């Protein structure tokens, strides 16, 4: 299969250029004004072609609870999330599809799904997400969300040491589960990848981190985790290790050029130096950090230190959508209030670079995706510059990043295969998906989280809030 997008606008140094973009099989074979037409000719006139963005951190099954969790900080929000998490792999399949659709229609071609596993049906959960991503055709990195400590352990103890119930699955069983998942689902050649994704220092033992590092080495897989998302986690790290959790992860060997770390809100300058040295990637999830009151990640500092930064939506219960363009916009302009020197502010072109190449690098895919380059995979997005939200004509990338683009995505290709055409997903039946999401849910007015009732007073006490 080959095709050529004719007369399409692409960004070049200092401006834009109209070119033909030729694709043979799954790769870009030419980009030039006079490149000959091979295969199907696609009209690119008045359209902008950009490399696909990476939704570099999300949890697809949170879609079932978007809009319902009250304004709460992460630790209490999690109690609500887990008390009402979907327990049926069919639902996992639907929310993975929904996450993929929203990612694709907001400029994404790759999704990193830090997938919450149904207890006792772990492989079935992964199979459901795998099926969804294969059917729709988005490039997916599935990181089964693993831990070996129970939820209460993620809250600092304060003065009195607290006994926590043992986690439902042993560390050894969890690592075996990951081995099985790798053997069964890791198929990079078709765009489905398994990554090792311990949830974070707040809920994982050293043995689990070490086991993940070993598996990552054996199978050449990426590493992923949450890192210092909240103030409580910073406090917890002090209790657990007596020093920074970034230093702890570095000592273990968890921080590498193929490690991506979600949030990174509460890092200090020494921690930032470690990230720069180890070439780990920060995944910036600005909407989640606002929604949960986690804080503002020091993204300008990261960029100045040479740390690679990408964008994620985070799960749909802490966002509460999967609009990647929205996350990129907020995640870019948010930092203008953190640094008075406007010369440090993120430009729309830098945002595009972070969302595409930044995301690719964090997944060890910098040589394969992330830019419009001959020889790279054809993972790209065609934007309709005649969409009302991108008019009148000024700077296309400025409009896309700083504006509020609606229905601006005309077409999407992943691995050279067209997935979206005329703003419609072609590979799955979206009407049927809407029907299923509607029928398998209901409007909810109120619900009562048992776990939250149990932990809230301790949380307030240890975080020094009025009780
Ligand atoms: Zn997350």
Image (tube, rainbow, N blue to C red):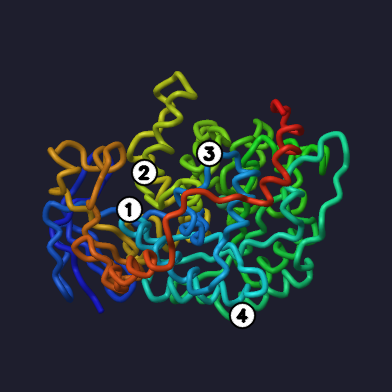
Give how far apart the Cα atoms at labels 4 and 1 are. 32 Å
Of mark 4 and mark 1, the one earlier in the sequence is: 1
> Do the residues under discs 1 and 2 have CB atoms within 8 angstroms?
yes
Q: Of circles 4 and 1, which is in front?
A: 1
Q: What element carries label 1?
A: loop
Residue labelled with disc 4 = 183
- Disc 1: residue Cβ within 8 A of ligand 1's nearest atom: no
Residue 226 left/right relative to 21: right
Residue 326, labelled with which disc? 2
Give how far apart the Cα atoms at labels 3 and 4 are. 40 Å
Q: What element carries label 3?
A: loop
> Do the residues under discs 3 and 4 have CB atoms within 8 angstroms?
no
Tell me: residue 15, above or below residue 467.
Answer: below
Of mark 1 and mark 3, the one earlier in the sequence is: 3
Q: Is mark 4 on a helix, strand or loop?
A: helix
Give how far apart the Cα atoms at labels 4 and 2 are. 36 Å
Q: What element carries label 2?
A: helix
Q: In which quarter of the image is the N terminus?
A: bottom left
Q: Of circles 3 and 2, which is in front?
A: 3
Residue 106, labelled with which disc? 1
Q: Of circles 3 and 4, which is in front?
A: 3
Residue 252 left/right relative to 129: right
> Do the residues under discs 1 and 3 have CB atoms within 8 angstroms?
no
Q: Which residue is drawn at 27% across and 41% down?
A: 404
Residue labelled with disc 3 = 71
């Amino acid at each position: 299969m080959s095709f050529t997008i004719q007369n399409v606008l692409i960004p070049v140094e200092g401006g834009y250029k109209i070119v033909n973009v030729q694709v043979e099989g799954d790769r870009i074979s030419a980009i030039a004004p006079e490149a000959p037409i091979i295969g199907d000719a696609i009209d690119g006139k008045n359209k902008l072609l950009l490399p696909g963005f990476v939704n570099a951190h999300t949890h697809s099954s949170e879609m079932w609870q978007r809009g319902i969790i009250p304004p709460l900080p992460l630790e209490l929000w999690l109690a609500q999330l887990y008390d009402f998490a979907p327990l049926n792999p069919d639902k996992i399949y639907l929310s993975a599809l929904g996450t993929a659709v929203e990612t694709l229609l907001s400029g994404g071609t790759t999704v990193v799904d830090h997938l919450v596993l149904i207890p006792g049906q772990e492989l079935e959960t992964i199979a459901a997400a795998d099926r969804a991503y294969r059917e729709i055709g988005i490039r997916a990195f599935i990181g089964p969300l693993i831990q070996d400590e129970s939820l209460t352990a993620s809250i600092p103890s304060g003065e009195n040491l607290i006994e926590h119930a043992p986690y439902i699955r042993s560390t050894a069983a969890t690592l075996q589960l990951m081995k099985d998942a790798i053997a069964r689902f890791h198929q990079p050649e078709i765009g489905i990848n398994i990554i090792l994704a311990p949830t974070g220092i707040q809920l994982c033992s050293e043995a689990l981190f070490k086991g993940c590092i070993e598996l990552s080495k054996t199978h050449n897989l990426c590493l992923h985790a949450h890192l210092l998302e909240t103030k409580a986690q910073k406090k917890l790290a002090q209790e657990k290790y007596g020093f920074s959790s970034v230093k702890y992860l570095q000592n273990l060997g968890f921080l590498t050029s193929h490690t991506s770390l979600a949030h990174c809100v509460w890092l200090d300058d020494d921690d930032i130096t470690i990230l720069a040295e180890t070439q780990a990637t920060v995944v910036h999830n600005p909407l989640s950090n606002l929604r949960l009151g986690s804080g503002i990640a020091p993204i300008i500092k990261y960029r100045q230190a040479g740390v690679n930064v990408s964008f994620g939506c985070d799960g749909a219960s802490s966002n509460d959508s999967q609009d990647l363009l929205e996350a990129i916009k907020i995640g870019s302009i948010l930092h203008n209030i953190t640094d008075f020197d406007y010369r440090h502010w993120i430009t729309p072109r830098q945002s595009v670079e972070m969302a595409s190449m930044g995301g690719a690098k964090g997944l060890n895919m910098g040589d394969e995706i992330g830019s419009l380059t001959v020889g790279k995979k054809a993972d790209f997005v065609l934007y309709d510059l005649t969409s009302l939200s991108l008019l009148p004509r000024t700077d296309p990338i400025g409009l896309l990043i700083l504006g509020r683009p609606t229905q601006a995505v005309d077409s999407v290709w992943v691995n050279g295969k067209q997935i979206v055409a005329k703003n419609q997903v072609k590979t799955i039946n979206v009407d049927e998906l809407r029907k299923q999401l509607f029928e398998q849910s209901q409007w909810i007015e109120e619900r009562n989280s048992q776990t939250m009732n149990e932990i809230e007073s301790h949380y307030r006490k240890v975080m020094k809030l009025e009780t």
